[in-house]
Structures are given as C-alpha cells and as structure tokens.
Image: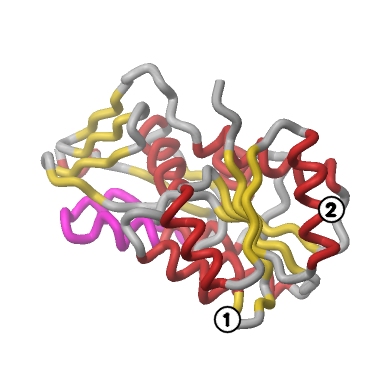
Amino acid sequence: MKPQRVLIIEDDESIRQMVVFNLQRAGFDVITASTCQEGRIALADQRPDIVLLDWMLPDSNGPEFARSIRRDDLTKDIPIIMLTARTMEDDKVAGLDSGVDDYVTKPFSPRELIARIKALLRRTAPAGDGEEIRLNGLRLNLETYRVYANDESVHMGPTEFRLLKFFMTHQERVYSRSQLLDYVWGSGVYVEERTVDVHILRLRSALKDSGYDRFIQTVRGAGYRFSAEKHR
C-alpha cells in the first residue's frame, strides 16, 4: 500500500528535521516547506494526505494560509494540524476558526504528534464501501466523501462532513457540545467546546443555498439537534 504523504510547513529547521525523522520512521512519505510559498507549490505538485502547519512563517502566518487552503477547491478537503507555541484559549480558537482540524502545542512529543496524525487520517478517510446516507434529497456518499443536495454538489470540509454524517444518523435527539466533541472528534482529542459552534456555523453555511441548514436546530442551553420531521 502506498504510504500516506505528510506535508510539513515549518521554518524552524531543527523542529522540521525532528518531525521528518520520526514520521519517516513511522512509515510516512514526508515532504517539507519552510515558507507558505513553498507550501503552495508542494500542495499543487505533490498533493499530500495531511498538512502540518506552523503558526509563524516568514512570508505569512499559519491561520491565513489555512484559510487559503480551505478556499481552494483542489485542497479544501486536506486535513490540517496546526503546530504552535501559542497556548492561550483565544489562540486555539483562532487557529480552529481558520479551518484547521487539530491543534498541537510546542513542545510536543513525536509519539503524540504521530498519534494525532493517524487519528485525523482515520477520521477523514472515506469509508470505502460505497454506502450512502439519504434523507429528503440530502445525500452523503461515504466512499467519495461528497455531499449532494437535490443532486447538486455541496462543498464542505472533512469535519463538517463528519458532523453532518453523525447528525443524519442520529436524528431528533439533542446533543451537547461535549457529546458532539466525543462522537465526532473523538474522546482522545483535545478540542475546545466552542469549536463545535464554529463547525456548526460552517455546516449551516454550506447547506444554506439548498435550504437544508434548517434541519440543524439550536436548542438553547442544551446543544444541537438535527430534525427533518417538520419538513417531510
């Protein structure tokens, strides 16, 4: 099986070499960049399976570059892990708001980073069995990771896809933010509860043109519910 490819965008050579060494030992194909410009070229030429992105880079910053990745149809579904020494909650929220899927603070252990990479790749990998979930004209293809609303393609990121999949297979019940974090992100991943609101907003935005955003209901003081009952 072809090894999964990791793009590391990190300007600190010592950190970059350490990460490369450990990822190669773990069986990954690794490519590197020290600037956002080099990262753009690598994304276009070599199509990584996942990106490790430093916050502070010479020609831009990680959050801005993450947003540019998410705006591009060719790269918008590539999972991103932010690497940074910033540990304040507001910084973590800002990083997640930019479109990254996970956040690892420096210094970090190589074993933890590899575990985070593998966990994120598992969560964002297509199911591979051709199964589809259908509801009132909304359709999720679990093999291709594509979403269709009334046969029109709907663009969304991998986290929004997983969130929508969970909602469509767990209708009517109210789920708190912490429950959604456990079920969608995984109990072993540290993510702020406010991150759920960010991804709910993105999911609603992706579904807005088709009108399916109305299925995602906010239950004040409790969490969120997915309900198509009133629209059948």
Q: Identify the residue position indicated by label 2 in the image.
A: 18
Q: Secondary structure at mark 1?
A: strand
Q: Residue at x 24, y 50 (%)?
A: 154
Q: Residue at x 60, y 52 (%)?
A: 7
In this rendering, which labeled residue sits more in front, label 1 or label 2? 2
Q: Residue at x 31, y 42 (%)?
A: 227
- As displayed, is residue 181 above or below residue 52? above
- As displayed, is residue 197 above or below residue 23? below
Give how far across and how far down residue 133 sits, in percent: 30, 28
Give the CA distance from mark 1 to mark 2.
23 Å
In the image, taking residue 39 as reference, residue 15 lies left or right, namely right
- The amino acid at mark 1 is Ser
Residue occupying the far top of the picture:
129
Give how far across and how far down residue 136 sits, in percent: 17, 36
* Along the viewing direction, whichever of 216 and 99 lies nearer the viewer: 99
Q: Identify the residue position indicated by label 1 in the image.
A: 60
